[in-house]
Image (cartoon, grey):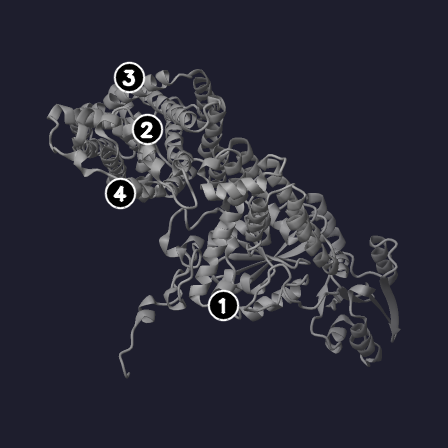
Amino acid sequence: MRKRFRSNKQSDNVFPIAIDELKQLVQDNFPNNPDLAFSIYHHNGKKMAVFFISYMVENDKIEKYILGPSLTMEKEWSTQTLLNEIPLSVGKTSTSIEDVLYGLLLGKVFIYIEQEKEIIEYILLNKEKRSLEKAETESLVLGPKIAFTESLITNLNIIRWRIRSTDLVLEEIMVGKSIKREVRMIYMKSIANETDVNTMRQRLLDLDVDEVEDSAVLSQYIEDSSSNLFPQFDTTELPDRFTYAITKGKVGLLLENSPSGIIAPASLFSFLESTEDLYMRWQTGSFLRLARFLAMFFSMIVTPTYVAVITYHFEIIPTQLLLSVGESRASVPFPPLIEALLIEFMLELLREAGARLPTKVGQTMGIVGGIVIGQAAVQAGITSNILIIVAAMSSLASFTAPSYLLGTTVRLIRFPLILLSGILGFIGLMFGICLLIIHLLRLTSLGTPYLAPLYPLSLQDFNNVFYRLPFNMENNRAKFNRPKDLVRYSAKEARKKQDIDE
Amino acid sequence: MEINSNVKSRLQFPAFYLFFIMYGAQTGVGIMGVPKYIFKEAKQDSWISILLAYILLITIVSVMLVILKQYENADIFGIQVDIFGKWIGKLFGTIYILYFFFTLLSILLNYIEVIKVYLFPTISSFSMGLLFIILIIYCVLGGIRTIVGLTFFFVILSSWILFPLYDPITRMDWDHFVPMFHATVPELLKGTKATTYSITGFELLFVIYPFIQNKEKIKLPLFLGLGYTIISILIVTVISIGYFSPLDLADIDWATLNLFKNVSYSFIERLDNLIIFEWMMVILPNLVLHMWGMTYGMKRLYKISQKTTLYTASIITLIFISFIKHDKDVTMLTDSIAQIGFWLLFVYPLILLPIVLVKKKMRRPRAEVKK
C-alpha cells in the first residue's frame, strides 16, 4: 500500500514534460494498443498533444468542439486560453499522470500544451447502451413498465426523475480491486435508518474482491450469511419498485453495467410484495397479496403431502377419494416418492429449457413438454393423474412470486421436503417444516430479522406486508425499517369528517 | 460467579413473549394423557382440581416473582449461590439442570412412544430422537432470539388443535358431571397433584427472567400464559369426562388424542393422525427451552460454553433414548420426574422465599452501617 502511494507521488511530478516523452509514457502504459489516438499539432511555435481512446469518446465532438476552435484560434495556446476558448462545459485540469491513464479508460480526452504545468481533460464518453425497454423478468399489468438498463447514468436519471427531492442521496463507492466498478448507494437522508446506511457503506468499503460481475453477485458478497437458502436482499429491475422501497426508508444499490438494483434490508415478505398491489384497489391488492402467501406455502408442501399421504397415511383420505387415487395409481409401478421426484424433475427441466431457449423455440417447447408430461406420462403408466394435478399446482404456485429469486428458492426447497416425506411420512414433512422455520428465524438481512414484522411482532406494520389498507389509513412508515421519520402524515387530519353541506 | 447476570440489551426480549414462553414450556406431552390421571383421583369433580391447580400455580409463580425481585437482574443459579454459598448453591443449581435434562428426556420418550403406539410401531427410537436433536441443536445454536421466536411461532401455529374439539363437545353427555361436589378435599388435592406434571415448565421463568426487557410489565403476559395452559387442560379434561364413559376413562392413556378420533371431514378422515404430527410443534418449544435452560445454567454455574453443553447433552439424550425401550421404563421415568418436579417446583420456592427475605433484611443494616 505504502509503495503504491509513493509511486503515485512520484508520477504526480511529471509535468511539465516534453510531448514526445508524454507520448512514450502513455504508450508504455497501453502496450500494443492500436486504438490509442495520440496526435500532435503545431500553432504559432507551440506544440499541442490531443490523445484519447478512439471508441471510448465521441469523435464528432472532438473534431467540432476541441480541434476546430483551438486550431483556428488567434490567441497563443496556453492552458487557460484553451479552457476559455473551447465551447464545452466539462473542462478540468489535472496534474497527475495516474489520473490521466485512468481517465483514458473513462472516456476522457486529454489536451496537453508542451511545457505547461497542467493537462486539460474533457469527459466526452461514448457509452454504447440499449434503449429503455419493458421489464422482462418482473412484469406488471398496471403501473410503469419501464425497466433499468445496463447504463448507470440512465438508471440514475430514471431515479432522479422519480424522486425529485434534494433529500435523495446517491453516494458513490468504488468496488473491485483490480477492475473497479462504480456502485451508487441510494437512500433518503431524512428517512433512512442511519445504522443501515452505515452498515451497508462499511460492507461495500470492506469488500476485498478482484471484480464484481453483477449486482446479483454483489448482493451475494455483502449479504449477512452466505450459507443459507433464501435471498437476503431484494433485487429488482423495476424502477418503481426500487424507488418505492427507498421512499419507505430502505437503502438501494445500483451497480454499473447491471440492469437490476438491490434493496436492503429485505424480509421474507418483501419478496412477495409487488408494487401492483398499490396500483390496485386496496381490497384487490390485499386479496392478491394474501393469495401469493398461500401460493408459496402451497407450492412447498403440496407435493410432499401427496407423497407422505400415499406412502404412509392413506387412512386420512376419505374413501371416495381413496378409490379414485387407487385407480389412477393402479398402473404406476413406482413408489410415490420416485413418481413425484420424476414429475417434479421433468417440470423443472421444462422450466429451465424454456428459460434457456430462444423465445420462439421456447414456446413450442412449452407446448410439447406440456402434452408429453400431461397426457403421455399418464397413459404410459409412469405417473398418476392426481400427481400431475398436484405437481402442476405446486409449480404454478411457485411462479406467482414477484421475485424470481424467491420462486427458485421455493422450488428448490420442495425437493428435500419430498425426500423427507417419502422416507418418514408426515414426521419427515413436519421435521422439514420445523427446520425451515428455525432457519428463517435465524436469518437476518442487514441486521434486521428476516421474519419481521411477524417476529419480532409488530402489529401496526402488518399493513403493507400482509394486506393493504386504504391510503388514508397508512399514516406511518413501517416500524421494522426503523426509519428516522416514522410519520407520513397526521392521522388526526386524515380521520377528520366533514359535516353534511359544508 | 456473579449473582446478577448482565445480559446484553440486544439479547433481551419484550415481556409480551412470556405469554408464549409460558404456554410453550408448559404444554407438551403432559396434556395428552392428563385427563386420566386427574379423573382417577377426583372423578367428575376433576375440573375443581384443575382450578385449584391454577390457584396453586399463581401462588407459586408470584412467590418466584417476589424472590426474583429481591435482586437486580438475577436468575435462580445466582440466587442460590448467594444464599447457600458457593458449594451448596452450585449443587442446587446442578439439581435444576439435571431436572431440565430428565424433563427433556421424558418429553421425548413419551412422544416417541405415542408415535409408536399410534402410527409407526416399528420405527426406531434412535432415528426419531435424532430428528428432534437436530432441530433442537439447530435452534439453540441460534440463541435466545431464535428460541423465543420458535416458541412464539409454534404456539400460534399449533393453536388450531383445540378447534376440532367442537366435534366431541357435541357428543358429550353432561350427566357424567353429576353429582357435583362429590369428591372430598383430599381427593381434590390429589387431583391437583396429578395435574402438576402437565403444568411444569413455568420454572423456566427462574432462568429466563434476566432476559426480559421491560420487567415492570411482566405480570399480565405471565399470568395469561399460565391461564391459557390451565384452560387447555380444563377443556380437554371436561370434554374427556363427558365424552368417555366414567368406567373407561380411567383406563385410557392419551385420552386427549382419542378425543380427535371421531373428527372427520369430507376432505380428510382420521384427523387424529394429523394431530399427532402437529403435536411435534407443541413439544418442540418445550424441548428447546429446556435444552437452552440447561446450557445456560452450565455456563452460569461452571463457565462451560453453551455449545459444549449442547452437544454433550444431545449425545447423552440420544444414548438414553436408544436404551430405554419399554413403556414401563418411560412411565417410571415420567412418574419420578413428576414427583421430583412437584417438590422442586411447587414446594421448594415456598421454602426459598423466607430465606431470601430474611437474608435481605439481615444484609440491609450491615450495608447501612458500612455507609
Write down the chain letter for disc 2.
B
Q: Could you say where residue B254 lies in the image, as x and y percent from the top left? A: 32, 28
Q: Quadrant of the C terminus of chain B?
A: top left
Q: Which residue is mark 4?
A: B170
Q: Which residue is mark 2?
A: B254
Which chain is home to disc 1?
Answer: A
Question: Is A238 on the left-hand or right-hand side of A278?
Answer: right
The residue labelled by disc 3 is B88
Q: Which residue is mark 1?
A: A279
Q: Mark 2 belongs to which amino acid?
A: Trp
Q: Is residue A200 or residue B282 the one in the foreground?
A: B282
How far apart are labels 4 and 2 at the CA level?
Answer: 20 Å
Task: Determine contact: label 3, label 2, CB under 8 Å.
Answer: no
In three-dimensional space, the C-alpha distance between marks 3 and 1, rounded to whole angstroms, equals 68 Å
Mark 4 and mark 1 residues within 8 Å of each other at the beta carbon: no
Residue A329, image x, y percentages: 58, 40
